[in-house]
Image (cartoon, helix red, strand yellow):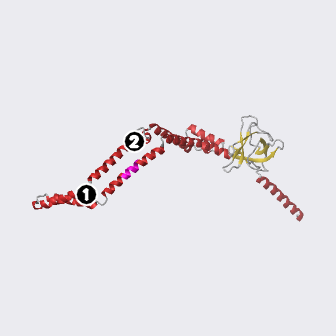
């Protein structure tokens, strides 16, 4: 039996239309070969929720958003979702708009209620909305920011109480005095290396000459006389004065450090300052250890993830 060209064209056209309809509905997240129920929820805002966005149960996709419409008089938004009819959902369940990823795309999560009666096609669910991505990140960072600010405030208070600027100025003056004294000593001994070496050589020769070489006694006495003249040239009197001045400066600095009245002495002897700094560092260490051990408490995107972080901490995992 021959099939006419018109019949073949009609069959191909029907197949093409069928494939187009099936493909279009597949792209929208609808399956024509599976029966489904449609449920609704009403929101004041949906923050970028669109048709075909996923519908989740316990984080698993079970359906998609089928419609989004606005009431022009109240500006309320009604969101419709389709879920396979074999999934039985309690009548008092909740449709919650949540963040689906870090980019900020949205999804609808169905939170089961405790009702023994199951929802029917076309039923209205209670509508809730999770905080946006920006608010979620802000909620995670806010406690950390407060803790860091508190630590910095404690450190600033401790340093301000010690008058650090005045202390550093006093220390700078003391170091400058040390440097000036050392420079004076260096200038005094500068160029005297050859003379000192000659003195040591003469002492060595004198020691050897005392080994019973009587004929050289006169020469030794002459060397001692020359050595005495060299020692006088070193100006030991001036050297002693400089050393005494250095000792005086060191004594003043030591007294300032040991005294509790001076700024530097207060910084060194103030045990309360040390206790404050130690307690502040301990608080910061505890906070960082908690973030490292239970990151979900601070980085969880959804409320469920953050609750898991809190539960993990309670269980000591």
Magenta span has 177?
yes
Q: Which residue is at the front of the view, 98 or 110?
A: 98
Specify the segment rendered in magenta.
Answer: 174-180
Residue 12 on image: x %, y %: 84, 61
**Residue at (42, 48) in percent of width and height:** 173
Disc number lying in front (2 or 1): 1
Q: Which residue is mark 2?
A: 256
**Residue 106 visible:** yes
Task: Give the residue displayed 88% in from the left and 62% down from the top.
Answer: 7
Q: Quadrant of residue 76?
A: top right
Q: Quadrant of residue 271?
A: top left
Overall secondary structure of the magenta stretch?
A: helix
Q: Is the residue under label 1 in contact with that under label 2 (CB below 8 Å)? A: no
Q: Bin the neighbour count of mark 2 within 10 Å (Cα to Cα): few under 14, some 14-19, many 20 and up.
A: some
Residue 266, compared with residue 196, is above or below; it is above
Front residue of 204 and 124: 204
Which numbered tag is attached to residue 280?
none
Measure the alpha-carbon separation of dots 2 and 1: 38 Å
Residue under numbered circle 1: 233
What is the secondary structure assignment of the residue under circle 1?
Answer: helix
């Amino acid at each position: 039996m021959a099939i006419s060209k018109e019949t073949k064209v009609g069959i191909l056209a029907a197949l093409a239309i069928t494939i187009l309809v099936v493909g279009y509905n597949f792209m929208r997240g609808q399956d024509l070969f599976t029966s489904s129920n449609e449920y609704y929820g009403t929101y004041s805002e949906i923050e970028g929720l669109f048709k075909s966005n996923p519908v989740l149960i316990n984080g698993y996709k079970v359906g998609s958003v089928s419609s989004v419409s606005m009431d022009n008089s109240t500006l309320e938004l009604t969101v419709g979702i389709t879920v396979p009819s074999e999934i039985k959902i309690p009548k008092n369940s909740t449709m919650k708009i949540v963040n689906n990823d870090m980019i900020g795309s949205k999804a609808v999560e169905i939170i089961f209620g405790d009702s023994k009666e199951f929802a029917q096609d076309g039923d209205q669910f209670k509508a809730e909305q999770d905080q946006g991505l920006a608010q979620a990140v802000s909620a995670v960072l806010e406690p950390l920011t407060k803790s860091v600010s508190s630590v910095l405030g404690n450190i600033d208070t401790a340093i301000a109480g010690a008058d650090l600027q005045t202390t550093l100025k006093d220390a700078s003056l003391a170091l400058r005095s040390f440097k000036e004294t050392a420079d004076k000593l260096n200038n005094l001994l500068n160029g005297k290396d050859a003379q000192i070496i000659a003195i040591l050589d003469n002492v060595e020769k004198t020691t050897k000459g005392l080994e019973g070489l009587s004929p050289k006694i006169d020469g030794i006495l002459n060397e001692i006389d020359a050595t005495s003249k060299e020692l006088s040239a070193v100006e030991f009197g001036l050297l002693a004065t400089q050393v005494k001045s250095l000792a005086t400066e060191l004594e003043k600095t030591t007294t300032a450090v040991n005294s509790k009245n001076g700024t530097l002495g207060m910084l060194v002897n103030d045990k309360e300052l040390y206790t404050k700094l130690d307690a502040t560092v301990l608080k910061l260490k505890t906070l960082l250890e908690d973030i490292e051990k239970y990151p979900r408490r601070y980085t969880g995107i959804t409320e469920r993830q953050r609750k898991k972080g809190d539960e993990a901490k309670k269980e000591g995992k």
